[in-house]
């Protein structure tokens, strides 16, 4: 009894959701619901996110909003509150509740056009929502995607794999009328220049090297790449699986195998896109040179399946649509 044991259970394939809301102690309004693109387990500050959610059902979104308001009222919050949820299928898990402003507040305010920090300050000073703020969650017709910016190139020994420890030092936002366009704008703002359809160098390939549990999940994105005319290369395990699914693949050696291997191909400018996920510490160490080489050579790389799917979807956006500009005020 004096030494309790705490057992944690990791929610596999769960979607993390950030929610900001404002309350005056008697009434609460959700400011924004943001769906993380990377799966739960990646620090919320490092994960890209979309406002409004792009894949969660309206029923789950409505339930998340209901639970957030109930918690704000039960806690007697006056001002801002942030809640982090995990959604697994139709099940909603509460990860943490913070009765304070979150780093997502400026993003939500810019995405919706509502000055929530200003409203929260007035509520904390004693004013009521009925006098100072919106009475319902803003419903923008556009999509806003937040992407994290990382300082990896300044630190030679740092790995780019994302995890529970926050590594980002900033963030950017992409606004558009659809998720793929907003995502590609956010990537561009963060310095990741995704290949443009029709302008792909036919001599270059996309590398796919993923852990066993991700192999089935990358089949559809791999097919999309082929449809865009992009050749695929893969390390042995991933290549075997993709070939069993009818996807033609050029095999390439791992870094731990005799040269020429994958890093040599990257340095020779044969690889223009990298998708790499790892299962354990050894695999992470073995594949470190791949991610580091991609970083230093400016090759777009993604270390989660969710990021890969979003990137492949964004690559289907034509160049003319991809870089269309629109005044911020016109979105409101």
Image (spheres, rainbow, N blue to C red):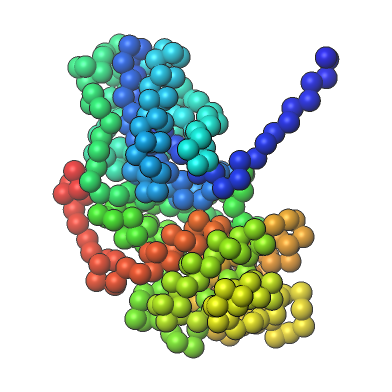
Q: Nearer the viewer, residue 62 or 4?
A: 62
Outermost residue toward the right?
A: 2
Residue at the spot x=61%, y=48% of the render? 163
| Quadrant where the N terminus is found in the figure | top right
Residue at the spot x=64%, y=82% of the render? 251
Residue 205: x and y in percent read: 52, 80
Q: Is residue 46 above or below residue 134?
A: below
Q: Nearer the viewer, residue 3 or 241?
A: 241
Residue at the spot x=74%, y=66% of the render? 286
As drawn, is 83 to the left or to the right of 2?
A: left
Q: Is residue 13 above or below residue 62?
A: below
Q: Is residue 153 visible?
A: no
As drawn, is 263 to the left or to the right of 6?
A: left
Q: Nearer the viewer, residue 293 or 65?
A: 65
Residue 23: x and y in percent read: 34, 19
| Quadrant where the C terminus is found in the figure | top left
Q: Is residue 261 above or below residue 98?
A: below
Outermost residue toward the bottom?
A: 203
Outermost residue toward the left?
A: 330
Residue 315: x and y in percent read: 38, 69
Q: How many marks?
A: 0
Q: Is residue 14 above or below residue 180?
A: above
Q: Is residue 28 visible?
A: yes
Residue 119: x and y in percent read: 28, 24
Residue at the spot x=30%, y=37% of the render? 109
Quadrant in which residue 9 is drawn: top right
């Amino acid at each position: 009894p004096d030494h309790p044991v705490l057992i944690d259970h990791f929610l596999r394939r769960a979607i993390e959701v950030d929610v900001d809301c404002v309350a005056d102690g008697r009434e609460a309004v959700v400011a924004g619901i943001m769906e993380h693109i990377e799966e739960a387990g990646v620090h919320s500050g490092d994960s890209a996110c979309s406002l409004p959610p792009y894949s969660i059902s309206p029923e789950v979104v409505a339930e998340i909003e209901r639970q957030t308001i109930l918690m704000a009222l039960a806690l007697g919050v006056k001002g801002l509150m942030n809640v982090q949820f995990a959604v697994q299928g139709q099940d909603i898990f509460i990860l943490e509740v913070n009765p304070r402003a979150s780093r997502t507040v400026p993003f939500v305010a810019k995405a919706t056009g509502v000055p929530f920090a200003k409203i929260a300050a007035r509520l904390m000073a004693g004013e009521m929502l009925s006098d100072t703020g919106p009475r319902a969650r803003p419903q923008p017709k556009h999509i806003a995607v937040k992407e994290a910016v990382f300082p990896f190139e300044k630190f030679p020994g740092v790995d780019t794999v994302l995890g529970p420890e926050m590594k980002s030092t900033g963030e950017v936002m992409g606004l558009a009328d659809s998720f793929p366009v907003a995502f590609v704008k956010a990537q561009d703002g963060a310095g990741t220049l995704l290949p443009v359809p029709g302008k792909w160098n036919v001599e270059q390939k996309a590398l796919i090297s993923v852990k066993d549990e991700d192999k089935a999940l990358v089949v559809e994105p791999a097919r999309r790449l082929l449809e865009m005319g992009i050749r695929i290369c893969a390390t042995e395990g991933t290549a075997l699986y993709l070939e069993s699914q009818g996807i033609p693949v050029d095999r390439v050696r791992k870094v731990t195998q005799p040269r020429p291997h994958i890093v040599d191909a990257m340095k020779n400018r044969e690889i223009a896109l990298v998708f790499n996920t790892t299962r354990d510490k050894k695999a992470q160490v073995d594949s470190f040179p791949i991610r580091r080489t991609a970083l230093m050579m400016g090759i777009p790389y993604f270390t989660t399946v969710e990021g890969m799917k979003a990137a492949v979807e964004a690559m289907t956006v034509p160049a003319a649509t991809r870089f269309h500009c629109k005044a911020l005020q016109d979105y409101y």
